[in-house]
Image (cartoon, rainbow, N blue to C red):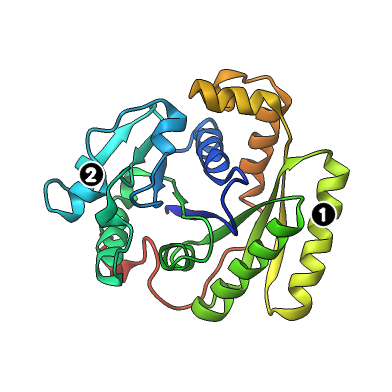
Amino acid sequence: MTHSIAVTSGKGGVGKTNTAVNLAISLGQTGKKVLLFDADFGLANVHVLLGTKPTKSVADFLDKKCSMEESITCFSDSMKIISGGSGLTELLNLDNRRRHQILTGISNLHQNFDYLIVDCPAGAADSTLFFASASDLAVVVLIEEPTSFLDAYALIKAANLETGVKNFAVVVNMAESKKGAKISFEKFRDIAMRFLDVNLHYAGMIPLSNAIRRSIVKRAPIVNDQPSSPETKAFLALAKEMANAPVNTHDGIRFFKRDVGAKS
């Protein structure tokens, strides 16, 4: 069975894509086969953080130039990526029909992977809500700033009211301390659950770190570049916590559901 995880954020600049990348690598290091899908169509940069140069993207699949499997770029034995395409303006406003094509194409790869990680666009964009609702688990990345809290709340509200997503795993990124991150989460959770019928699960924290910034500049994910660092340990703990986070079971179109084209 393939597990799907959508990584989201209420706003840009909070480290969502870097979290998705290092989470995917961390899951791969546990012996799992991972597919990282960059769903930030037209503005994709997963491949930049990984230092890879995909020859194909999801745009080639949509244009029927290749199969979904042929659009995959190999990063390592345990992790593959599908690029969302960079600088392709025609991908910025995909309609639901084409999103369904992508979902079906990826779902047909279910025998090849244990985990699908979807790096969604920041904010409550249509693509974000679509892929978050289609995933087993919705991860929300935020930082300890009021604007990040407000935007994350708006995203959770939209996902809950418009698509029925109820369970969210929250990652506090760029945190000053473990204690402070947990307190920040509890404040955010109490506000969100006061006004929304949702369940927020604390997935963990990633420390504020110059080492992570340097790894981004180097295009060398810190989990690979500094395997013994505190930052890597935080990402490995996050990967482990994914097994404890409550999944979403609402009705609707889902990744790897039999009725979206997955073979039994």
| Type of amino acid at the residue the image marks with label 1 | Ser
In the rendered image, residue 125, in percent from the top left (x then y), is placed at 46, 65
Question: What residue is at 36 percent from the left and 66 percent from the top?
Answer: 257
Quadrant holding the C terminus: bottom left
Marks 2 and 1, the one that precedes in the sequence: 2
Q: CA distance from mark 2 to mark 1?
A: 41 Å
Residue with the mark numbered 2 = 69
Quadrant holding the N terminus: bottom left
55 sits left or right of 216 in the view:
left
Vertical placement of residue 32 versus 96, above or below: above
Farthest left residue?
Answer: 65
In the rendered image, residue 197, in percent from the top left (x then y), is placed at 68, 79
Question: What residue is at 83 percent from the left and 60 percent from the top?
Answer: 186
| Type of amino acid at the residue the image marks with label 2 | Glu
Question: In terms of image quadrants, where is residue 74?
Answer: top left
Residue with the mark numbered 1 = 184
In the rendered image, residue 255, in percent from the top left (x then y), is placed at 38, 62
Which element type, helix, strand or loop, lies under badge 1? Answer: helix
Vertical placement of residue 62 versus 73, above or below: below
Q: Nearer the viewer, residue 65 or 3?
A: 65
28 sits left or right of 203 in the view:
left
Using a 10 Å C-alpha cutoff, classify the residue at mark 1 as few (fewer than 14 neighbours), some (14 to 19) or many (20 or more): some
Residue 108 visible, this angle: no
Q: Which disc is residue 228 wearing?
A: none
Q: Nearer the viewer, residue 223 or 115?
A: 223
Q: Nearer the viewer, residue 199 or 110?
A: 199
Which tag is nearer the camera, tag 2 or tag 1? 1
In the rendered image, residue 219, in percent from the top left (x then y), is placed at 48, 24
Using a 10 Å C-alpha cutoff, classify the residue at mark 2 as few (fewer than 14 neighbours), some (14 to 19) or many (20 or more): some
Which element type, helix, strand or loop, lies under badge 2? Answer: helix
Question: What residue is at 77 percent from the left and 65 percent from the top?
Answer: 189
Residue 154 visible, this angle: yes
